[in-house]
Amino acid sequence: MPTLLSVNVGMPKDVPWQGKTVYTGVWKYPVVGPAMVRRLNIDGDGQGDTAGHGGEQRAVLVYQIQSYRHWQRHFGRDDLGYGQFGENLTVDGLLDDEVCIGDRYRIGEAEFEVTQPRVTCYRVGMRFGEPELAALLVSHHRPGFYMRVVREGQVQAGDRIVRTRTGPGALSVADTDALLYLPGRDPAKLRLALDVPALSPGWQGSFRELLAEADGTTTTAPPAWSGFRALRVTDVVPESTTVTSIRLTAPDGSPLPTARAGQYLTLRIPATTGPAPVRSYSLSAAPDAGSYRISVKHEPHGTASGYLTTRLRPGAELEVAAPRGEFVYAEDSGPVLLVSAGIGLTPVLSMLHELAAQGSKREVWWIHGARSPREHPLAAEAHDLLTALPVAHEHVYYSAATPEEIQHAHATSGRLTKDKLIALSIPPDATAYICGPAPFMTDMRQALTDAGIDPERIHTELFGTLGAVNPGLTDRSTRTPHQPPGPPGTGPLVTFARSGITVPYNTDTNGTVLELADACDVPTRWSCRTGVCHTCVTPLLSGTIAYSPDPLEPPADGEILICCARPDTDVVLDM
């Protein structure tokens, strides 16, 4: 008969880690006597990162004494006390390859339902003192699992554990964990998992994405070419006082691979000294024209934009990586909103070109904010495209224009704000694409949500670095990316394209690409830090890497897991 050996709780606290501070509740310790289990927690317990732990679906974490013994043998340790793996309930029995998602158990006065395996997380390795433990829990098929509380009540060590219901589908915790994190997954098992109502919504969403990939219905496609290739500049056209368009073609005159509307190009800019700057710019014209057009804003003191807008001439060649990006136009029949500010109009203008080329019957809304007509590039082009569409609405806002300019351009005076957007009576069944400065996109997303649009139908594109995902870290201050401390390395050059810096890799001190990025304050996205969860997956624009340790499942071609990658050659990363 399975038995509850220990109830473990602990409140979140600050813990020093690699020169940073992590707020975490992974330190759990045994309770003496009965403990009250409630819908969201056990009395005296808490989670530091509620985005990844806790909540109704992850109220209680379970780990087995059999797995304790396995890890004692594996690591040669005899110092493991209950709660060592961050679990709330240490049990005898309930093995991961026997317990199924949807199983229900009565323990003491309370009843529970199994919802998902443990989430891979670096903090369990912090607590245990083994950084690679998150990966080992998966590869050894010993993750442990979460349960939701069906009936509240008291539990205590010594209580018997009685199964009251068997989950549908007989999908074990170990099999469910392997489906998400290990290669060679069976599509039939993915479908089986999606038929288990008790499976937590987050895991259901991940399995839907994996099933779409297995069925070939995902929209993700590999880049048209690897690395950088030379493209010829055929036109350099000033569009406004600050923006210049550049047309690129294949040197041999052959048509370039078709891009998707909304994607971007990454360019290596010629440099007279030091490493060549690498910058990304959205496509701004029809994606199937056989050539590519980008429109570049000249930033004050911008080395790359200054060269492209003032020194570049037709006939020159630039090193260009293939079109990339997930901010892309998707076919649909409902209304579509193209919302932008400043130079953020470029990717949505590409989408407008596609709609016009298709002769789309969709209701199209073009909503743009700029300072004045002098700083509104490609305005006439956008207007002509909208005129060709059967159902189009054009709304332009100028924040610093004269009354005459406002009247001539048929624009509205003032900034494009949340209130003004809501006042347009946007159709609530629309799909929206937003591009512009980060605060603008945040405001517009909130405005569209307030207007009744489903947040899943609101898509945003950020020109700069992606927002960091660093679960548990308390120091969220942002610094401009910089060279790492200490003497410069002599190894391969690592270029963080979105952050605009190139760093010589130091073989002795830099560790993984993720650790190098952290040292440079380049925004990073990660969770397990051991090659399991793929949160850190990053496009590799050029170069080669080696893994140490090897990830449990390699990423797609053209992508790497920076948490366990080290450069073999000079590399350029889209981060």
Image (tube, grey):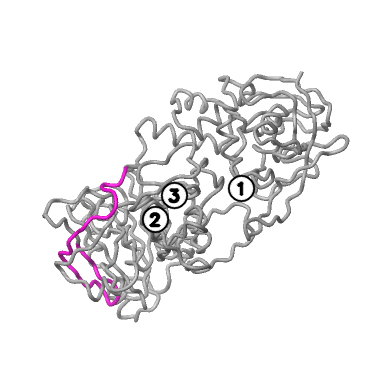
Seen in the image, is 129 located left or right of residue 120? right
Q: Inspect the image, locate mark 1, and give the three-letter code of the amino acid beneath it.
A: Ala
Mark 2 vs 1: CB contact within 8 A: no
Q: Residue furthest left?
A: 253
Write down the residue under mark 2.
573
How far apart are labels 2 and 3 at the CA level?
38 Å
- Residue 87, given in percent of the width and then of the height, sits at 71, 37
Mark 1 vs 3: CB contact within 8 A: no
Quadrant in the picture for the C terminus: bottom left
Graded by Cα atoms within 10 Å as few (under 14), some (14 to 19) or many (20 or more), the crowding at tag 2 reads many
Quadrant in the picture for the N terminus: top right
Mark drawn on residue 51: 1
The residue segment tinted magenta is 222-247
The first of marks 2 and 1 along the sequence is 1
- Residue 33, given in percent of the width and then of the height, sits at 88, 35
The first of marks 1 and 3 along the sequence is 1
Q: Is 240 covered by the magenta stretch?
A: yes
Seen in the image, is 60 located left or right of residue 477? right
Q: Residue furthest right?
A: 33
Secondary structure at numbered mark 1: loop
Of labels 2 and 3, the one closer to you: 2
Residue 28 visible in the shown view: yes
- Residue 271, given in percent of the width and then of the height, sits at 29, 71
**Res 116 → quadrant:** top right
In this view, the residue in front, 467 or 167, is 467
- Residue 427, given in percent of the width and then of the height, sits at 41, 51
Secondary structure at numbered mark 2: strand
Residue drawn at point x = 61 percent, y = 40 percent: 133
In this view, the residue in front, 496 or 102, is 496
Residue drawn at point x = 28 percent, y = 58 percent: 283
How far apart are labels 2 and 1 at the CA level?
27 Å
Q: Is residue 354 above or below residue 310?
A: above
